[in-house]
């Protein structure tokens, strides 16, 4: 009995000890009570939100792919698995990808609310506190912008909810926009001295990122379904803040923007805000890779047998409407597609794929309906990251959330709405000049055949030299043994000192081979045309210098005569205003021009569907485009994209918004499903 009493006392003592332990704040895990005590902890909490934006459920895949991949610029080429991902407007409220945008936006908002609830805890420099708070407020506004533009009326949660706060009513979209505006304007004040000039990187939010995104918010607010057209003046105000800051400018080479994103090289002047992945700067959590350039990319297989290879599924193809929207050189004789005056076309609409594995083979894709979306090119990602020894590899292409060209196009659209097109030309023409390569000088515009030659059974090389510039390249088109045209691959290198001041010389074929000693009477086949060497001096084995592109082309050390006709061509260069939009458009026709320019410039950057919706005719536009696509070959299995066309035909009024997720409707009894779902 005594022993039992002792055991009982021990037990009681143990209970007393447990109670004392439970009263003590935990030290081996974090809660809101024992965290957020230092600046470092505040920064770490903010970093986590940035990192979560590049989750597969958000910008690492879904936001740039799942529900924006069938419009008039790009269409899914998938069947059953496309339906499973929501690519062809054949989804419902239970689809996991529908729910993930909602789920992870609110996860981010909850984490930000907790951070803001504890922002004043640490003793720290107030300037640093303001930077963290400003970024947090902006990100909360940005996540609510994602939610309302995708789902319409949504619950507005501005604090850390209690465990019993489950049923939260949605608020009207206009009120959500008002809160987004409030958060972002407060962020603008807090970040007034925090610019890319201080950071030198752009995968965290700076002052002009806030201002540029506010302009986009106002643009959406001004359009359907709110139609609050007074907001166009706010678009002008906020785009002017970005433009007049002097911190941003267009990259003269459109292609280089996306090469930089693949290489994780910051272009803080063009890319106002991008989401970082691997190799991120301060303020961004490293991630394990993403699907950018995969589903929306140029088809290829990653193989250890080819160090240049990469992995891309290419689950979407461009549309002929997008391809045809880029201006072509009317004098081009290249076939089957004329050369484009706009360098954006051949970058965005890739006319080839890679097939095979040992080694890969580059195969032509001349039909626009089956061209891959070429903007995000995984071949530029570091080979070490691509991991050629692995089955899938990893990729770190950063996502351009908002670029300076978008700011200029928003400025043009708002100016046209408020004041008409007179002053709006200034902004759209900057974007067009860059698209044509004319931002800082002139480039090769056209190559015209003067003699098609004969006897060619292989494609001869084309060299373009002189004229004060460099970097222009072309490919000969051989038909029936003749060079019938030159496809201009690149109009020139778009860097200072590389622009053309006069027409360069075009030479078809290679007139010399390094290491060969040329002698009198030597017979040389150039493009399968026989040439006879006539020496103008002693023999030479150094690369001769072209002085003429004529049929009896003279080169240093030797002169060539030939048996049979040789192909020849001449080049012309542009003049600085050739890219400008047609002058004298009225308000309505200028607005249509803006719509086309936004497609040409911003295709595959997940803004086209939202643009079509805010312009108020999404369903009608898609129905009309489906009719046009049908009559222009999209439904032909061998050369079109019948799966994408079926996706177009599925569009109805309910697709203006995503459905509220089924799981959320089951949890929150105050939610109301969107119309049509």
Image (cartoon, rainbow, N blue to C red):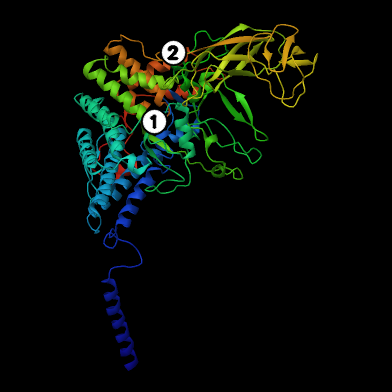
Q: Secondary structure at mark 2?
A: loop
292 or 398: nearer the viewer = 398
Residue named by callout 2: 575
Quarter of the image with the N terminus in it: bottom left
User: x%, y% of residue 190?
Assistant: 23, 44
Where residue 366 sits, quadrant-wise, is top right
Determine which of the numbered discs, if any, sits on residue 606 in the image: 1
Residue at the spot x=38%, y=20% of the render? 597
Q: Residues within 10 Å of mark 1 (few under 14, many from 20)?
A: some
Q: Quick check: 521 above or below 655?
A: above
User: x%, y% of residue 85?
Assistant: 44, 35
From the image, state whether disc 1 or disc 2 is nearer to you: 2
Where residue 456 sits, quadrant-wise, is top right
Q: CA distance from mark 1 to mark 2?
A: 33 Å
Determine which of the numbered discs, if any, sits on residue 266 in the image: none
368 or 181: nearer the viewer = 181
Q: Quick check: 229 above or below 672?
A: above
């Amino acid at each position: 009995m005594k022993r039992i009493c002792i055991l009982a006392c021990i037990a009681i003592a143990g209970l007393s000890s447990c109670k004392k332990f439970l009263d003590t704040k935990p030290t081996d895990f974090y809660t809101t009570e024992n965290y957020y005590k230092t600046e470092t902890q505040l920064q770490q909490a903010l970093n986590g939100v940035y990192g979560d934006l590049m989750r597969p459920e958000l910008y690492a895949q879904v936001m740039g792919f799942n529900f924006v991949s069938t419009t008039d610029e790009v269409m899914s080429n998938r069947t059953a698995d496309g339906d499973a991902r929501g690519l062809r407007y054949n989804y419902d409220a239970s689809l996991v990808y529908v729910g993930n945008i909602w789920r992870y936006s609110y996860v981010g908002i909850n984490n930000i609310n907790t951070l803001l609830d504890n922002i004043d805890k640490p003793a720290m420099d107030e300037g640093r506190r303001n930077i963290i708070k400003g970024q947090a407020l902006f990100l909360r506004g940005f996540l609510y912008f994602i939610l309302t533009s995708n789902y319409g009326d949504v619950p507005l949660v501005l604090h850390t909810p209690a465990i019993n706060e489950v049923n939260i009513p949605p608020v009207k979209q206009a009120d959500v926009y008002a809160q987004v505006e409030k958060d972002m304007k407060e962020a603008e004040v807090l970040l007034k001295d925090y610019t890319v000039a201080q950071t030198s990187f752009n995968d965290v939010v700076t002052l002009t990122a806030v201002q540029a995104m506010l302009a986009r918010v106002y643009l959406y607010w001004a359009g359907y379904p709110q139609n609050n057209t007074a907001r166009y003046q706010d678009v002008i105000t906020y785009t002017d803040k970005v433009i007049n800051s002097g911190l941003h400018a267009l990259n003269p080479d459109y292609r280089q923007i996306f090469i930089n994103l693949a290489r994780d090289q910051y272009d803080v002047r063009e890319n106002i805000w991008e989401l970082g992945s691997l190799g991120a700067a301060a303020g961004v959590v490293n991630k394990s890779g993403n699907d950018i350039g995969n589903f929306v990319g140029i088809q290829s297989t990653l193989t250890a047998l080819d160090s240049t290879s990469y992995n891309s599924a290419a689950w979407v193809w461009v549309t002929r409407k997008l391809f045809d929207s880029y201006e072509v050189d009317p004098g081009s004789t290249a076939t089957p597609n004329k050369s484009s005056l706009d360098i954006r076309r051949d970058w965005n609409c890739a006319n080839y794929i890679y097939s095979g594995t040992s080694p890969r083979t580059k195969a032509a894709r001349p039909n626009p309906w089956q061209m891959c979306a070429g903007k995000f090119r995984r071949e530029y990602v570091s080979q070490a990251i691509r991991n050629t020894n692995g089955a899938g590899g990893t990729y770190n292409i950063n996502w351009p959330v908002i670029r300076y060209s978008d700011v200029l196009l928003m400025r043009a659209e708002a100016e046209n709405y408020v004041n008409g097109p007179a002053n709006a030309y200034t902004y759209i023409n900057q974007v067009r000049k860059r698209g044509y390569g004319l931002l800082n000088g002139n480039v090769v515009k056209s190559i015209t055949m003067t003699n098609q030659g004969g006897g060619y059974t292989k494609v001869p090389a084309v060299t373009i030299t002189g004229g004060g510039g460099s970097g222009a390249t072309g490919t000969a088109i051989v038909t029936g043994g003749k060079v019938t045209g030159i496809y201009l691959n690149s109009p020139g290198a778009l860097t200072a000192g590389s622009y053309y001041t006069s027409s360069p010389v075009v030479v078809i074929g290679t007139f010399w081979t390094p290491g060969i000693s040329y002698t009198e009477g030597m017979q040389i086949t150039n493009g399968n045309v026989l040439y006879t060497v006539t020496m103008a001096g002693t023999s030479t084995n150094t690369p001769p210098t072209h002085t003429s592109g004529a049929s009896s082309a003279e080169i240093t050390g030797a002169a060539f005569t030939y048996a049979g006709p040789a192909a020849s061509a001449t080049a012309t260069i542009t003049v600085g205003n050739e890219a400008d939009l047609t002058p004298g458009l009225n308000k309505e026709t200028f607005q249509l021009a803006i719509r086309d320019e936004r497609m040409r410039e911003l295709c595959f950057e997940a803004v086209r569907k939202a643009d079509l919706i805010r312009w108020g005719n999404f369903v009608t536009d898609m129905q009309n485009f489906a009719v046009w696509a049908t009559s222009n070959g999209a439904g032909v299995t061998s050369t079109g994209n019948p799966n994408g066309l079926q996706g177009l035909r599925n569009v109805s009024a309910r697709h203006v918004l995503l459905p509220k997720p089924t799981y959320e409707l089951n949890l929150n009894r105050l939610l109301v499903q969107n119309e049509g779902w």
